[in-house]
Amino acid sequence: MPAGRDTSSPPAAHRLNHALREAGFAALIAIGLSFPILALGAEPDINNQLALQTRWSWMFTAAVLIGSARFFAVMLDSSRARLLAIAGLLCTAFGFGTWYFAGIADPKIVGGTIAAGVLAMLAAFPADKPEKNAHSAAKTPARPATNLSSTAASLFSAAGIGALIAFPLAMLWWFGSAGSLKWINNYGIQILIFVMLGWGLNIVVGLAGLLDLGYVAFYAVGAYTYALLATQFDLSFWICLPLAGIMAAFWGILLGFPVLRLRGDYLALVTLAFGEIIHLVLTNWSDLTNGEAGILSIPRVTFFGIPFTAGEDGFAHLFGLQFSPIHRTIFLFYLILALALITNFATLRLRRLPIGRAWEALREDEIACRSLGINTTNTKLTAFALGAMFGGFAGSFFAVRQGFINPNSFTFMESAWILAIVVLGGMGSQIGVALAAIVMVGGTEALRELDFLKQLFGQDFNPVQYRMLIFGLAMVLMMIWRPRGFVSTRTPSIFLKERKAVAADLVGEGHG
Amino acid sequence: MEFFFQQLINGVTLGSIYGLIAIGYTMVFGIIGMVNFAHGDIFMVSAFIALLLFLALTTVIGITWLVLAFIIVLLLAMFFTSLWSWVIERLAYRPLRGSFRLAPLISAIGMSIFLANFVQVVQGPRNKPIPPMFNETIALTSGGLFDVTLAWKQIVIMAVTVILLTVFWYIVQKTPLGRAQRACEQDRKMAALLGIDVDRTISITFIMGAALAAVAGTLYLIQFGNVNFADGFIPGVKAFTAAVLGGIGSIPGAVIGGLLIGLIEVLWSAYVSSDYKNVAAFAILIVVLIFMPQGLLGKPEIEKV
């Protein structure tokens, strides 16, 4: 786009003219984009005939918002001022929205937000000072590698693990046994499952550089292995857990063999197809999996054989506690925490073994790797098998936690979700993946908390339905702004004299 | 035998739709080497645009002659869908040119999720049915177990596909624009040195792919009579399979691949199992990518160090 931001600033009048033209063009495009799909709506009536509705206000809102955003983007130089202006714009829009769409005429809310928004937009202009280092990232050659103090890093991870161990007890103490269920279950366990899946996929994508879009297949294999063994053969969770891992690893190798020759986009699509086939087989092979209805009443987790029941031989009675369903949830939390930490520990150790070094070499350059005599077949297969094994563990944990599984939990969206966690976290970075899982899973869970928006936008407004919309957009924006994720530095596992992190600018382009 | 012929006709109809979508994949892959994962959702968006325009034309403006309404809807849907594709290429793919290898693919996956959920939020999650049209049938045989029939909508689908493919073939083969596209496909840097505006050519490639996807979307709507926000994914993967089967980068290959995938899908559901018809398409994708990655008409890819 012909923005004037890179050239020396043109005369003010000329610039305003240019910005207005750009804004008008952007608004026109916005109208073109939203004309059929946003401005017109169709809902089936009682005769199942579609009736057309018009929503011109939506279209004009979109046009005004996009046009103004473009105007600020052209007029303002510094990203700080741009952010301020866009925030003001959204604030103003929010004020008008509550008034126009929700019919809330409370002058304090409407007037307050509009005034604050306009002020922010106006303040953006004086705040627009050229940033000294605005383009330095692009212009200066690669930054020198930052030294990561290893004691600080280990202190940080120790504090993190300590906080995680204390988390359920703190929640229990703070919210009581009924109120803490949501926090431990929806936030704690849910996030940790995705941390574990992210770490498992990180072996395949982050370390070995093999883009896998069908990772959910192994998660499904693990879940169904446990569910079927437990319901058909009465095996306990502790026997099934390793079996589920072995089963998933077996499927990982089964997938790995044919795709050895593929890489990049082709590999991604074959793994996607594989994941979809597993999903379709689970849906249609009703004799084994009970199809869409899924497997019900999977045995729940026991405390190494002691069930979490209220009876005489239950956990609470044996330990002299008052029975509460929260005990099981807390146990599940520690279980998934332990599983995730094992995944992390295994990955960190594997990176120092020859096989781990071979993975990373494979990621950087497959041809060079082969020329140096590394057996790429074994390297790829072990990456697939180990990644799949941890997916299988996570799957059997999922089954024991839910007590019910059906194929709908294992769709392509789950794979995309796990991949997004790995990519947004920074491929190959363990801490980055954990952070990304917290932000993404925690963030979407937090959308459920935004019930106050219902009071502003009416009862039909459901923030949860915007979850995937925001998720898709975030994936695109992350690729544009930080394609290497939150933690873009790489920490080599082998070093001379002192440990160093390699800055993202220095990370070369691999072939794998 | 009648049964087989009937399935053959149905398969060619379905295959035409897949072929039209597949061209978008194959051209974009040919020119920038990227799997445009959002293309299936562009197709779904176009079906929605066609549905809304059709409703607007018939109920608000009151056009009763179906053929006229169909032509207007087709042209407008092509225009609006192209606009979507142009904006997406501009915002989500162009900034990533020269970024690391997986960035455009991941961005495209994000765009695909965004489009599907955007349509779900603004148009609702339910199936959108339209009244059936071009439904009269012609009996081709009589006297057998049952009559082999050809519905008018199938004739419309095949005719529109043939006409558009001819126009499209003419553009790619005979016009300066097509020459620029083929030049960019062979060597982007050299094409730029010879004065071709590469960015513009890539944009036009996206626009052309989206226009053909819009034709497919409109025809899909006529054939199946309803559309849903989730309808982009499976046809998208199947069309991609068609592009790979025909040889990615090759336009006639995409059409042949589309027809083959359509036929295989229909015959598979007729003779083997309709539950597993999608498994057949995915299995073909896997088998072709592994054993015949150059496809039927593609050039083998040689990797240089």
Image (cartoon, coloured by chain):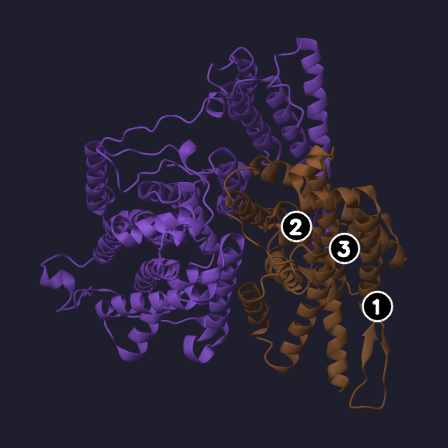
- Asked if one can make out residue B197 in the rendered structure from this viewpoint, the answer is yes
Crowd band around label 1 with a 10 angstrom C-alpha radius: few (<14), some (14–19), many (20+): some
Residue shown at 36%/55% (left/top)? A373
- Determine the secondary structure under disc 3: helix
Residue bearing mark 1 = B155
What's the residue type where badge 2 is placed? Gly
Instruction: Decide which of B141, A39 is in the foreground and name it.
Output: B141
Q: CA distance from mark 2 to mark 1?
A: 31 Å
Dot 2: chain letter:
B
* Residue labelled with disc 3: B215
Task: From the image, state the color of chain B.
Answer: brown
> Disc 1: which chain?
B
Residue B294 lies, in percent from the top left, at 61, 61
Q: Quadrant of residue A364?
A: top left
In the structure shown, which secondary structural element does the residue marked by tag 2 occupy? helix
Q: Residue at x 63, y 26 (%)?
A: A70
- Between label 3 and label 2, give the one nearer the viewer: 2
Residue B130 visible at all: no
Residue drawn at (46%, 53%) of the image? A211
Q: CA distance from mark 3 to mark 1?
A: 15 Å
The x, y position of residue A361, in whole percent, is 37, 48
Q: Which mark is residue B30?
A: 2
Q: Amino acid at mark 3?
A: Val
Chain holding disc 3: B
Residue A246: image x %, image y %? 30, 68
Image chain in purple? A
- Residue A437, picture quadrant: top left
Is A155 or A261 nearer to us in this picture? A261
Q: Residues at badges 3 and 1 in contact (C-beta under 8 Å)?
A: no
Q: Name the spot of residue A243 as percent of width and height, x first.
A: 28, 70
Residues at marks 3 and 2 on the same chain: yes
Q: Amino acid at mark 1?
A: Ile
